[in-house]
Amino acid sequence: MIKKFLPYMIGGGLLLILVFWYISVKNGAVTVDQAVKKEWGNVETSYQRRNDLIGNLVKTVKGAADFEKTTLEAVISARSKATSVNIDPTNITPEQFEQFNQAQSGVSSALSRLLVTVEKYPELRANENFRMLQNELTSTENQILTARTRFNEAVEKYNNYVLKMPRSFILSDYKEKALFKSVAGAEKPVDVEFDFNNEKK
């Protein structure tokens, strides 16, 4: 009697194993995908903190007499461009990252020029509020680096999960996500030059 139903029992058992494996793979994909979204949220939060600090820094610097107008305008413009670039964490493409990185690189470059130019203004360097904002910006840059690193780790785990066979057969709707990469030319030292004969405010 048992022998008669043995093939059906084996078939049913195998089917049950496949169903549980399928459910496990799908749930695993959701887990790694959510981890990427969480880390991207941390990246956005870090950049938002920097943007907020830059706004306060600009207000502080504006109070300095004869501060270079073009230097401030460059920071304000770069910050505005960076905040206009939005990325959908469910569909992160290399092109989106390139645009995002370029915008954030523009902020970093303009901000660096601003901080170097401040050296000409002893009253600004002695301003307690300015020094506090400068220290907070340095701390925030470290937070951004950490957030980007953790995001890349989450994306690497996600990509390995959804792209490896045999999981890739049933996760075809989960696409590879892009990683943060250095902006082209970032490995080269930056040559910063200033024209201190600019038109004053």
Image: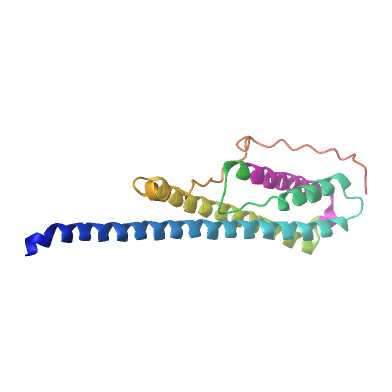
* Magenta residue span: 98-124
Q: Quadrant of residue 144?
A: bottom right
Residue 156 seen from this side: yes
Count of numbered badges drawn on the protein: 0
Viewer-proximal residue, 195 or 44? 44
Q: Quadrant of the N terminus?
A: bottom left
Q: For this rendering, which residue is in front, 17 or 185?
A: 17
The one nearer the camera, 139 or 83, is 83
**Whether residue 63 is situated above or below residue 96 in the rendered picture:** below
Residue shown at 34% from the left, 47% from the top:
166
Please name whichever residue, 176 or 38, is drawn nearer the observer in this view of the structure.
176
Q: Left or right: where does residue 186 sit relative to residue 159?
A: right
Q: Is residue 119 visible?
A: no
* Residue shown at the point (54%, 60%) measured from the top left: 38
Residue at horizontal 92 percent and vertical 50 percent from the top: 66
Please indicate whether residue 72 sits to the left or right of residue 50 in the image.
right
**Image x and y of residue 94, in percent:** 58, 42
Residue lying at 84% horizontally and 51% vertically, measured from the top left? 121
Task: Locate residue 158, reporting x and y percent.
Answer: 45, 52
Q: Is residue 184 left or right of residue 127?
A: left
Q: Quadrant of residue 93?
A: top right
Q: Is most of the magenta stretch helix, strand or loop?
A: helix
Q: Is residue 175 left or right of residue 191?
A: left
Q: Position of residue 141 (x, y in %)?
A: 64, 54
User: In this picture, is 56 found above or below 172?
Assistant: below
Is residue 36 on the magenta stretch?
A: no
